[in-house]
């Protein structure tokens, strides 16, 4: 019996049995420690017996087999919390499970009682790991005086291997360990040895699993720096470049055995997506009205993971945002056109837009490059042609402009369409030059957003957004009509009609402004 000062915690659970009877599973943790709830949760998570409640047809043999396996699993759970002198008893119908054979399981199994006495918690007396690269410090949890959790030893070994791999030692691995529990002192001495292995360079990239995407294009897109010192970051970057193309359902990079010249071949194992995709949709809104859209996509148009997309849409049917709008466009993207970091894009679009501030028939074509600086930061440079016929408060006019768009984007959001953490910033500069007249200028636009979440499961999200825009070099009557700024409606000033805010030039006449500043703040709660 536990002494009077001991704390006994029992957890009961009724489980449905195969014989339509109830198995009563109890967990008793006999300890005086204040963190008994954490220990109980750890043991319950490790136990197979407690997982049988999810198995509707579990029988007596299943309970006995799970109970016999739980000795080692619960012991491992105790080690993970720093307890190295624990006692475990698992009683099935009052009999110790270790003495039962699964084929001789009692019928029925009515009770399973798990009793755990964890004993004292151990601290590290000695905590040594090596060799380590110069300047590498083990994790703070693996140090003398810290709680001797087994996970701390594992984490220290993993950190050491990561440090050696970062130095080019791709085959670094733990080489052995010495662990001694000194029970009188309640201390654990641990020493882990690491075998760094030789410093390696990247060997050739081998490709497996591709059928339609050409091998040489996969190598070009991956951009593995063959001949340079091995780097885990470079290896991950190569895999991510392949995934970003959208041509592959899965990408895995495998480090092969190194050769006598200390080069290590890498195998890219890929599984291709279906090359074609078609989609259509319809949407109805009380403000925007009815919209229809459709697209056709080819993920590997020329055998080099090129994406070609044709899309069309009809929007604003019966809405409050002007008349009906039409658009038809094509886009083409070719990854790794000028090195692995630089993609080529081309697009063309013909549209009719009937907004409150203008009516415009427009053709726009653009070609350019996108270069990724990091996974979160990239820029775009292009050249385009914009031609349109416009009716607005300045009258009817035609124009044609050469455009030179440039943009810089930084995006660390967790989910672009439903962000809860991270930042987003994009700055766009589009100089333009009239083809027919002596008119030139530019449009500048910047958009920045930040997201922070709080509370249980981060269900409360605070979001802030700021926008700035300017058209310079020309007057409002000379600038492209859709380069000017209106506001109102979603995405700008909510509560105001769509594009109902602009520059009043007299009477009921309203045109877009050459400058714009906006700010929004939102509080979102996930229900």
Image (cartoon, rainbow, N blue to C red):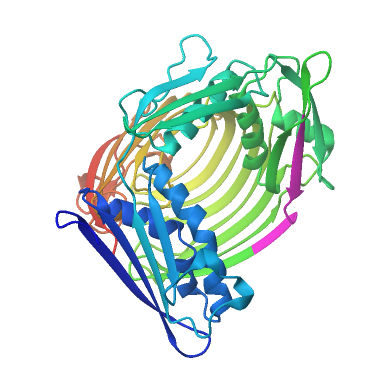
Q: Nearer the viewer, residue 121 or 441?
A: 121
Does the magenta segment cover residue 359?
Answer: no
Query: Is most of the magenta stretch helix, strand or loop?
Result: strand
In the rendered structure, does residue 267 fall within the stretch colored magenta? yes
| Quarter of the image where one finds residue 519 | top left
Look at the image and give the residue range highlighted in magenta.
266-278
- Residue 270 visible to the viewer: yes
Q: Would you say residue 58 is visible in this rendering?
A: no
Q: Residue furthest left?
A: 5
Seen in the picture, residue 45 relative to 475 is either above or below; the reply is below
Count of number-bearing discs? 0
Given the current orientation, which residue lies at the most extreme top position?
134
x, y (%) of residue 245?
66, 41
- The image position of residue 329, as x and y in percent, is 61, 51
145, 422: nearer the viewer: 145
In this rendering, position of residue 268 left or right of residue 507: right
Classify the position of the N terminus by image quarter: bottom left
- Left of 130 or right of it: where is 82? left
Displayed quadrant of residue 288: bottom left
From this view, report whether residue 461 is shown above or below residue 407.
Answer: below
Q: Quadrant of residue 276?
A: bottom right
- In terms of depth relative to the viewer, which is nearer, 204 or 485? 204
Measured along the vertical axis of the image, is residue 4 above or below residue 183? Answer: below
Question: Is 228 placed above or below 301 here?
Answer: above
Q: Is residue 209 left or right of residue 100?
A: right
Location of residue 340 in the rendering, given as x and y in whole percent from the top left corner: 68, 27
Q: Of 72 and 207, which appears nearest the observer?
A: 72
> x, y (%) of residue 136?
46, 15
What residue do we see at 50% from left, 67% from top?
A: 97
Quadrant where the C terminus lies? bottom left
Name which residue lies at 75% across and 44% down.
270
* Residue in the image at 58% along x and 19% along y: 164
């Amino acid at each position: 019996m536990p002494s009077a000062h001991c704390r006994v915690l029992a957890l009961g659970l009724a489980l449905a049995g195969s014989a339509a009877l109830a198995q009563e599973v109890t967990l008793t943790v006999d300890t005086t420690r204040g963190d008994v709830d954490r220990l109980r949760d750890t043991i319950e998570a490790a136990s197979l017996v407690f997982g049988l409640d999810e198995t509707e047809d579990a029988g007596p043999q299943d309970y006995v087999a799970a109970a016999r396996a739980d000795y080692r699993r619960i012991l491992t759970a105790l080690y993970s919390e720093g307890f190295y002198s624990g006692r475990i008893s698992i009683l099935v119908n009052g009999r110790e499970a270790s003495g039962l054979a699964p084929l001789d399981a009692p019928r029925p199994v009515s009770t399973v009682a798990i009793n755990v006495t964890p004993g004292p918690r151990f601290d590290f007396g000695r905590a040594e790991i090596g060799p380590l690269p110069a300047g590498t410090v083990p994790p703070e949890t693996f140090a003398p005086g810290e709680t001797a959790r087994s996970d701390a030893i594992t984490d220290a070994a993993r950190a050491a291997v990561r440090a050696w791999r970062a130095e080019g030692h791709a085959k670094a691995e733990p080489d052995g360990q010495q662990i001694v529990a000194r029970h009188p002192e309640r201390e654990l001495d641990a020493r882990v040895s690491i075998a760094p292995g030789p410093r390696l360079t990247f060997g050739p990239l081998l490709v497996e699993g591709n059928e339609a995407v050409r091998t040489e294009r996969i190598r070009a897109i991956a951009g593995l720096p063959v001949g340079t010192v091995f780097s885990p970051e470079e290896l991950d970057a190569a895999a991510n470049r392949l995934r970003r193309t959208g041509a592959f359902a899965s990408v895995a990079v495998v480090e092969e055995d190194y050769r006598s010249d200390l080069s290590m071949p890498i195998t890219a194992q890929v599984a291709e997506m279906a090359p074609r995709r078609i989609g259509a949709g319809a949407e109805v809104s009380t403000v925007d009205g009815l919209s229809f859209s459709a697209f056709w996509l080819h993920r590997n148009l020329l055998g080099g993971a090129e994406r070609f997309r044709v899309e069309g849409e009809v929007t604003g049917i019966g809405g409050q945002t002007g008349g009906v709008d039409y658009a038809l466009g094509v886009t083409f993207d070719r990854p790794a056109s000028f090195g692995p970091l630089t993609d080529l894009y081309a697009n063309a679009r013909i549209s009719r837009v009937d907004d409150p501030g203008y009516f415009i028939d427009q053709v726009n074509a653009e070609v350019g490059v996108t270069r990724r600086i990091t996974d979160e930061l990239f820029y775009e440079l292009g050249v385009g042609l914009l031609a349109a016929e416009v009716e607005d408060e300045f009258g009817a006019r035609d124009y044609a402009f050469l455009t030179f768009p440039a943009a810089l984007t930084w995006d660390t959001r967790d989910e672009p369409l439903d962000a809860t953490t991270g930042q987003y910033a994009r700055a766009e500069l589009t100089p333009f030059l009239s083809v027919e007249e002596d008119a030139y200028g530019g449009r500048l636009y910047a958009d920045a957003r930040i997201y922070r979440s709080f509370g249980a499961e981060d269900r409360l999200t605070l979001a802030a957004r700021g926008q700035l825009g300017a058209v310079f070099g020309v007057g409002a009557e000379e600038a492209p009509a859709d380069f000017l700024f209106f506001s109102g409606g979603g995405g700008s000033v909510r509560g105001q009609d769509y594009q109902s805010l602009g520059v009043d030039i007299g009477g009921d006449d309203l045109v877009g402004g050459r400058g714009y500043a906006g700010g929004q703040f939102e509080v979102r709660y996930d229900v």
